[in-house]
Image (cartoon, rainbow, N blue to C red):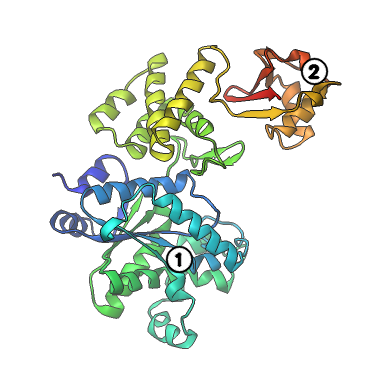
Amino acid sequence: MSNIFDVLKERGFIQQTTHEDEIRELLGKESVAFYIGFDPTADSLHVGHFLQVITMMHMQRAGHRPIVLVGGGTGMVGDPTGKTDMRKMMTPETVQYHCECFKKQLSKFLDFSEGKALMVNNADWLMNLEYIPFLREVGRHFSVNRMLTAECFKSRMEKGLSFLEFNYMIMQSYDFLELNRKYDCKLQLGGDDQWSNIINGADLIRRVDGKSAYGMTFTLLTTSEGKKMGKTEAGALWLDPEKTSPYDFYQYWRNVDDADVEKCLSLLTFLPMDEVRKLGALEGAEINKAKEILAYEVTKLVHGEEEATKAQEGARALFGKGPASTNVPTTEIPRSEFAEGMGLMSLLTKLQLTSSNGEARRLIQQGGISLDGEKVTDMKHSVKAEDFKDGIMMIKKGKKVYHQVKLV
């Protein structure tokens, strides 16, 4: 069996390591306990987290032991990384609810039976720390001058960095120390924006307990232009089907830029690399085959085979100008609401295709709305019950967003 380090490197995951040769040797000779942390800033994981989830799946399949750390403690402070302003403070009840949601989602991807993976909450040790003993044992090992050179802090110095957030790096480092002591966790993994936090954790273990510990970061999920992937007009691309429908999730991957197809296939699916390279090399109209495979494989991983098949059939029906599909997002509205006609702007806002009448007006004027294939540019257009064919109307927003309205 090939070393998982080589597999991750070939697929384009690995960005930085504390000790590349030692990590590779360690992963090749024993089952290693490793951890990735997830701060509960929302009630669902999003596609940015999914890259970390895929990494854990690769590692577990290779015989290593994932420790999922849910940040019930660090979530009370908030990671300043990548933020221009301080995060909104959450109540303990909100943080706990988000943690429970994360646990449920992550259990779909990892095998937690018989201790093959662990899920822990850093609130269990961080919330009960005594301040003075913590400063004496841990705080003395951190140089403020060195901490201020970290990118996560440097970018905040002009706008102001609160003392609360300044503690985040120390708390995350302490997590690694605690997991090392409790579970012999030797390796911390994370996105490349976590590099400063990760190297400080490995360094703390060496300083306090004199033991070897390692860190490894992964590429962030970005487009070929360097922009973060997973952002849609509606916001983040969530893993929760109630927040992002399987159809919309599928459509996102079906519509990625040609230049990003190979990278996404490599990072977000388990297809063999020779197949990934063949698909990535397709050009012109042929690349759409690769995009279909990408969309299907990622949706299958997140939502299951049945939902992936439904989403694929719905997309094919629309792209092939076939009949309206039941797999397209659908809203049922009483026929009576269209008796006197409903303004198109009001309808778009009601369906949450636009956030306001002003946005709806601009979209209509710019030719961005079609009803059953017919472009509508009159912002005063009224939709009546008789406009529906067999009680159904397909609304198209822009080039890629479809929504079906059904009269009841």
The residue that mark 1 highlights is 149
Left or right, residue 53 beside residue 257: left
- Report which quarter residue 397 is drawn in: top right
Numbered mark located on residue 384 in the image = 2
Q: Give the answer, above or below, for where 78 lies relative to 242.
A: below
Q: Is residue 229 above or below residue 334?
A: below
Q: Is residue 109 above or below residue 362?
A: below
Q: Amino acid at mark 1?
A: Thr
Instruction: Give the structural element (helix, strand or loop) at label 2.
Output: loop
Residue at 72% of width from left, 37% of height from top?
355
Quarter of the image with the C terminus in it = top right
Residue type at mark 2: give it.
Answer: Lys
Label placed on residue 39:
none
Q: Is residue 39 left or right of residue 9?
A: right
Residue under the image location 49 percent in, 76 percent down? 127
Which of discs 1 and 2 lies nearer the camera? The answer is: 2
Q: Residues within 10 Å of mark 1 (few under 14, many from 20)?
A: few
Q: Which of the 4 quarters of the picture holds residue 7? A: top left
Determine whether, in the image, residue 42 is placed left or right of residue 19. right
Depth check: give the residue in front, 316 or 48: 316
Q: Earlier in the sequence, mark 1 or mark 2?
A: 1
Percent across and percent down for residue 368 are: 68, 22
Screen quadrant of the N terminus: top left
- At x 74%, y 33%, the residue is 349
- Could you say which is closer to the camera, residue 152 or residue 211? 211
Q: Secondary structure at mark 1?
A: loop
